[in-house]
Image (cartoon, coloured by chain):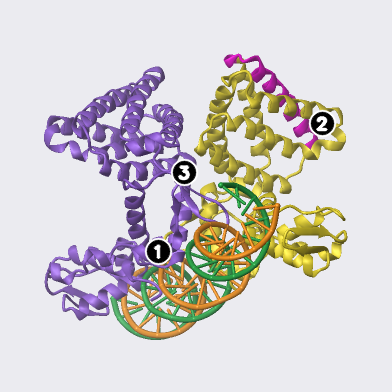
Chain colours: A purple, B yellow, C green, D orange
Amino acid sequence: MARQNTVFKEAYNRYAAALRTDTALPSEPEIAAQLGVSRSTARAILTRLSEEGIIRWNKRQKTVLRQPTDRDLFPSEETDSLHDIIERSFMQRILADDAAPGMQINELELAREIGTGTTSVREFLIRFSRFGLIEKRPNSHWTLKGFTREFALELADVREMFELHSAAEFGRLPQGHQAWTDLAAIRDDHHAMLADINQRFRDFSVLDERFHLLIHRASKNRFIADFYDAIAIVFHYHYQWNKTAARERNERAIHEHLDYIAALESGDQAAIEKACRAHLHSARQTLLQSLPQLATETA
Amino acid sequence: MARQNTVFKEAYNRYAAALRTDTALPSEPEIAAQLGVSRSTARAILTRLSEEGIIRWNKRQKTVLRQPTDRDLFPSEETDSLHDIIERSFMQRILADDAAPGMQINELELAREIGTGTTSVREFLIRFSRFGLIEKRPNSHWTLKGFTREFALELADVREMFELHSAAEFGRLPQGHQAWTDLAAIRDDHHAMLADINQRFRDFSVLDERFHLLIHRASKNRFIADFYDAIAIVFHYHYQWNKTAARERNERAIHEHLDYIAALESGDQAAIEKACRAHLHSARQTLLQSLPQLATETA
DNA sequence: ATTTTGTTTTTTATCTACAATAAACATTTT
DNA sequence: AAAATGTTTATTGTAGATAAAAAACAAAAT
């Protein structure tokens, strides 16, 4: 088959889950905009909802007849985009214990294992290569460079340059700027999490990402933003595999964030730089400690 | 057809051009290594050279019978890799006057215009997207972000962060390091070019790239190296279109480079930072001035 | 024993085809 | 007239096929 209708299925699930009985639905363009899909897909969703007897649809009249149940929704395997499936599968592979740096990556084999065509795998690898974890020799195979100590150090160096830059820019934002409100909200979330740290320490990574993303947006630089995407992906998958001492690590990080936030709010550039450096220094240690032992040895 | 044999043709041309009558040729693996291709391709080259009566080939005996002429070589259109063809064609397009930021990029149209399949164009665009000049909306078209003022400023900011870092690292390289020898050679090349600046100012861009590449290698950071690739591509194509005041601009840059080199050689970190900043500041101005007028206006 | 050549297999690069999705165009309704 | 719906067209995303190129294996020569 040429293409899975995952966009349709995923949007269908989202829309069905939000339906409330006896309400009237808006126009097709509006539904499409709400879901972030084209009107063609929105119509396909309405068609199916109608066929399933969930809504009555006649031109402008669209009324919800009944609440959809779980059985009306598509199973989650069918709603994942191919890109996500490949990404998960690939990350699992390269974070597995037997994935040694220097290992060859075979497009065809990967495609077969995931159950997909080679084109999609190729395109994924090309996109993924920007994260510096794999490398290609033209007309030949990809090589896994891996989560090595070098990788962590290079990543940390660039991260520090970028974040110092972004933090300084953040400190220069004018008073009424939206970012200050967002920062205050994030500060409160930190306090809330700290109050219940034993239960909630696992949620820290989400908060961490929100915080750093907010900082980086202040620099309004596409290269910095792109790099932060890379960091986010790496951290996302990497920390799923390395959960040692998460509570202590996260609690310490929260305190550092609070210092950092206070410095930002003070507007004192020297204080900002100091707090930022302090946090980045310990973030670097955390990253280095979380490396898989195998990868630390090899180059 | 599935794939053009451009690797073969390009390597054939290279090898044929270097042949000298009555010499004996080395073993197949050695030829392959010299040319940077596989032995299969090397054998294909030997087979053709033999068929064309340019060499006599019998197992280990390989003697050059006659000097190949220009007519023995493949025409240059047939030796360019598809990737290069697409890159040139695409850059020409986005640097053309009517390429306004915000413009849609159509894969199929591009492919037809270049005379290639859509897959190759897609893959090129994905690779190219890391340079921040184009952006994709999923399930929809690519958008040209263009050589805008924002692009130049963001590029320059990151460039400055990276180069200051690399220059500082360079200053810390140990005495006997190869980089110092390379730097001295580049210094001499600068003096040589300066002595004959009216004739040679057009060659500066090559020297410029060599110099900055040498600096960046000192940081041993894959992200910095990758970013410099982006800069190099952008400059390579961009300056082909913008040649105003090249002589003055390049002469000034040479002087700045020489100051910069002297600072590096002094090992004085404060002096390095100062010279580096001075050069980067004027490089930024040059970049901003070279922007096409159209792109400066729009966001 | 190692290197070289001969032969076969594997893998990549690229094209083409087609369903899903988006976008454009035409008609109807408010 | 503007917005919604109905219909058609264009474009993207993905699979599958195939020649080129690389890599692996086998036999022969130093």
Crowdedness of circle 2 by 10 Å Cα count: few (<14), some, many (20+)?
some
- Vertical order, A42 against A155 (above or below): below
Secondary element type, mark 2: helix
Q: Chain of mark 2?
A: B
Chain letter behind tag 3 = A
Secondary structure mostly seen in magenta is helix
Q: CA distance from mark 2 to mark 1?
A: 53 Å
Identify the secondary structure beneath mark 1. Answer: helix
Between residue A72 and residue B20, name the one nearer to us.
B20
Q: Secondary structure at mark 3?
A: loop
Callouts 2 and 1 on one subunit: no
Residue under the image location 76 percent in, 41 percent down: B244
Viewer-proximal residue among C2 and B43: C2
Report the residue marked by disc 1: A111
How packed mark 1 is, by other alpha carbons closer than 10 Å (few <14, some 14-19, many 20 or more), is some
- The residue that label 2 is drawn on is B193
Residue beneath the point at 38% across and 23% down = A277
Q: Which amino acid type is marked by label 1?
A: Ala
Query: Quadrant of residue A212 in the image?
Result: top left
Q: Which residue is mark 3?
A: A132
The subunit carrying tag 1 is A
Vertical position of residue B134 compared to residue B73: above or below? above
Q: Residue at x 62, y 18 (%)?
A: B175
Q: In the rendering, at what x and y percent does residue A40 appear?
A: 36, 73
